[in-house]
Image: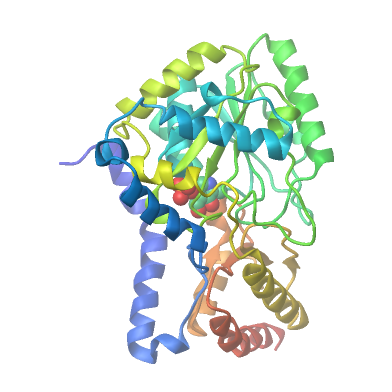
Amino acid sequence: MIAKKMIKYIEGSSVTRAMFEEGKRLAQEFGQENVYDFSLGNPSVEPPQLVKQAFIQTLEEEEPCYVHGYMNNSGYEEVREKIAQSLNRRFGTGFSQKNILMTVGAAGGLNVILKTLLDPGDQVVAFAPYFGEYNNYVANYDGEMAVVAPNPPSFQPRAEELEAKLTPRTKAVIINNPNNPTGVVYSEETICQLAAVLEKKQKEFGTAIYLISDEPYRELVYDGAQAPYLTKYYKNTIVGYSYSKSLSLPGERIGYLVIPSEAEDFENIVSAANIANRILGFVNAPSLQQLVVAKCLEASTNVEAYDRNRRKLYDALTEYGYHCVKPEGAFYLWVEALEPDDGAFVARAKEYHLLLVPGSSFMCPGYVRIAYCVDPEMIERSLPAFRRLAENYQK
Ligand code: PLP
């Protein structure tokens, strides 16, 4: 008999699982080239060439005991120092290796920091729509989610709404910029307003409210957009970063947390996060990947390829009558469903072999997410299906 807690996960995951199975079934019946799978955020562009060279060089030139061995649970000091210096160059910050903890991707980092911060019943606030896994990560540590309602059409978080959700039990606020699923980049103005509310409420409650900035898409920005670096705006910020998207390495599971020295209770957070990394069973982030990414800090992915997909899909869908948020970052297009029930709309889209994710999975019904990190030829082939789907509703 499995744990009662896990039963609801099995039931809850059935929507995504069903879509995946349905995709496979459709591909078998109609041929892979006639199925348009926009469901997953798996990077479609190859890792930069430098990554492959770094793997080879690391394996050939470094001592095997060093490459494959245990190290400090927070990661190799020299890797963390290189990352800290790279951040300082890019963002004018003042980090050193003691501020960096290497993690098993962003997911590992979020779990480490939530385990570090949360007592049972502590509250974590997130802005809808948001990456649905946050609910599970917070539940892992018996925290409670408080959800700020979506703010269409800009989907910039509203500071007044945040203020209304904050209580003396609020331990953390999670922000994801650039955003999955909307593709919106939260502006500096938004960040300043959120920081002001957090400062005010910390004073009022006499507590520390940590702003966890989940940033796997930081480098995936278009048309000159830039995501502000949050530690400069709010001292109790903790940044979670990942190389899953920026270097197309999602299966390698590598990222890091930034814990600024100015953060309240810094020493304890660093010590506890180091232990959390160990006792969650990660022990440390993968050793080879740490050494590889340290050699690739100046590498960048092929953002132009995603940008071409973005333009193609946004322009076409807008022309067919869909209402889309023009993405400024990440690789998702956020589109109003053509009927109020986003689940029903996703089911209808499936009849046209279009696999989309319902907004309800991101706590925002009435919308769908289209992941455009796909082969551009699949986008081209899918366009007649998107057009027919829209026409079907216009009839
Ligand atoms: N946070 C967001 C917003 C994501 O979209 C994802 C993955 O898609 C993650 C975290 C997890 O990323 P990682 O592969 O680095 O664990």
- Residue, x 32% and y 27% (percent of image)? 278
In the image, farthest residue toward the right? 189
Picture coordinates of residue 271 (x, y %)? 44, 16
Residue toward you, 28 or 365: 28
Horizontal relation, residue 253 to residue 176: left or right: left
Q: Decide if residue 145 is in sight here.
A: no
Picture coordinates of residue 138 (x, y %)? 46, 33
Please tell me in which quadrant of the rendered image residue 53 appears: bottom left
Task: Tell me the quarter of the image containing the N terminus.
Answer: top left
Scheme of colours in the image: rainbow
Residue toward you, 294 or 252: 294
Vertical placement of residue 393 versus 334, above or below: below
Residue toward you, 86 or 301: 86
Q: Decide if residue 314 is in sight here.
A: yes
- Residue, x 58% and y 54% (percent of image)? 299
Horizontal relation, residue 237 to residue 284: left or right: right
Residue toward you, 257 or 69: 69
Task: Tell me the quarter of the image containing the C terminus.
Answer: bottom right
Picture coordinates of residue 284 (x, y %)? 35, 33
In the image, farthest residue toward the front? 61
Please tell me in which quadrant of the rendered image residue 167 appears: top right
- Residue, x 61% and y 33% (percent of image)? 85
Horizontal relation, residue 136 to residue 366: left or right: left
Vertical placement of residue 310 versus 41, above or below: below
Please tell me in which quadrant of the rendered image residue 165 appears: top right
